[in-house]
Each structure stands twice: as C-alpha cells, then as structure tokens.
Image (cartoon, grey):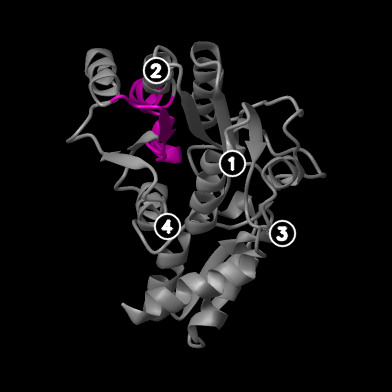
Amino acid sequence: MNILITGCNGQLGNEMQLLEKDNTQHTFFNTDVSQLDITDQQAVDGFVAENGIDCIVNCAAYTAVDRAESDRELATTLNTVAPAYLAAAVERRGGAMIQVSTDYVFNGKNHLPYTETDTPSPDSVYGSTKLAGELGVTKFCSRTMIVRTAWLYSTFGNNFVKTMLRLGREKEELGVVFDQIGTPTYARDLASAIMTAINKGIVPGVYHFSDEGVCSWYDFAKAIHRMAGIATCHVRPLHTSEYPTPANRPHYSVLDKTKIKQTYGIEIPHWEESLADCIKELLKE
C-alpha cells in the first residue's frame, strides 16, 4: 500500500517512521507542513491523487491544550477541518483513514475506564475540536479507524517525561498533581498497534489505546525520577486546584483497551515497562 503519514515530525509520526524499515511491503510518504499543508484542501486532494495514497495515518494535530482555549480558530482548522479534507481525499480512492484522537473527548467524571460506547462530553476547546474531527472523518471516509489515546510521551519532541527529567535535575522540589488519573502511553507502543492494524486489515470504528495500568501524574513523575536515578528532587503531590490552567483536564481518563486487543490480537505492555525502555534510550543520548 501507499501510506501517507501526516505530522511526521511529531512524537507519533517519528515513531511510525522507525517502523518503516520492517514494513518494506508498503511505500510511505512522510509529510509535515513543509511537504503538505493539510489545511489546504486542494493540496491534499492533489497529493493523495498523484501519489496513489491507499491509507492515511493522521498524526498531525493542534495539541497545545491550554493555548487552544484562546486560539479556537487554529485548533478547529487543524483538529476538525483538515482531518475531513484528508478523509474525503482518501475516500475518493477507496482507501482507509486512521485518525488519532484523545481521552479529552471525555470530561473525566467517570470512575470506571471509558469504553468506545461511552458518550463523549469534552470539557475543553482541544477536546471539542478533536471530537468534531472524529465525526468529520467518519462522515467523509467509510473505512475510518479512530484511535483515542492519552498521556503520550516518547524520546522525540517535548513531553512530560522529558520535562520531569529536566526539572528533576534542576530543582530541589517539584509539585505535581495527584488527583488526575490516567495511563501514560509510549508513542512507540501506539505506533506499533497502528502498524498492526494496517497489516492485519483495518476494521472501521472507534478504538481506545494506551499502555496498561493506571496512575496519577504524581505517580508518573515519581516513577520517572526513580528510573532515571534522580534522588535530589523532592516531588510533592498537588491538588488540581493548586495548579490552575486555562483548559480543564479530565480527572479520570483511563481508557478500556479490550476492543483493540481483541480485534487485532495485540498485547499491550504495562506503562512502567515502556517507561523504563524510553528512559533507557533518553539516558543514552
């Protein structure tokens, strides 16, 4: 297949590229805004048609959650409008679309892991634009797979793991919220699951993917420091109310992964195993 990866310089896009050497049966087109502006419908239509694209993995998104509150227009363009352009273009070729979405489509007021059949209720501009993006791609491409994920990190780009490593070395004390619960997700694990879906044959629908297990941001920070051997920084638990942000965060956003595991026969590692792998790589750098 000819596969288009958008947002190739982001965390997930970079991880997708690492898998290409083991999937030489496909031809990959890795693009970021300099190669393809996905907000330009004409450019999208032309690129997909000229390169005979059979499948699009949309890793591009507006992910600055707090900034989105005051920058709704750009967040909407990138998270809602552009994915619909991609979906419509690949549908004309009878192709498939994989749209990466987020736990922020839920308001986080559950106390049980969210399943794909739970009704979304976003509580932020970011979550609202991503949910609208899901609806758009489903409307315009009949072979759409939506993958909601959460707490993404990797060796690439900026993320919580890298921030905690840097602050842990710089500061003697650090406050991290303990009343937001979810699951860290190594972007490499998500990329692997997406590639498995492509190779086994995309079954349209909504899927949830994160690593296994549950923790708070505080627990996550403590684990990062422990695994990196940082012992000089005291991490203390904060209430969300002590750390106000422009966008509301879900207090509980654990995702139930049963559907993706059963549909594609994948095994998902525990978040601590994957975190250890990522930190090992980061400490090599």
Q: Residues within 10 Å of mark 2 (few under 14, many from 20)?
A: many
- Is disc 3 placed on a helix, strand or loop? loop
Q: Earlier in the sequence, mark 1 or mark 3?
A: 1
**Distance from label 4 to label 1 (Cα)?**
31 Å
* Label 3–label 4 contact, CB within 8 A: no
Could you tell me the amino acid type at mark 3? Answer: Val
Residue indicated by mark 2: 81
Residue 189 position, x and y percent, is 54, 56
Q: Which residues are magenta?
A: 52-79
**Distance from label 2 to label 1 (Cα)?**
29 Å
Residue indicated by mark 1: 200
Residue indicated by mark 4: 159
Could you tell me the amino acid type at mark 2? Answer: Val
Could you tell me the amino acid type at mark 4? Answer: Asn
Q: Earlier in the sequence, mark 2 or mark 3?
A: 2
Could you tell me the amino acid type at mark 1? Answer: Lys
**Distance from label 2 to label 3 (Cα)?**
33 Å
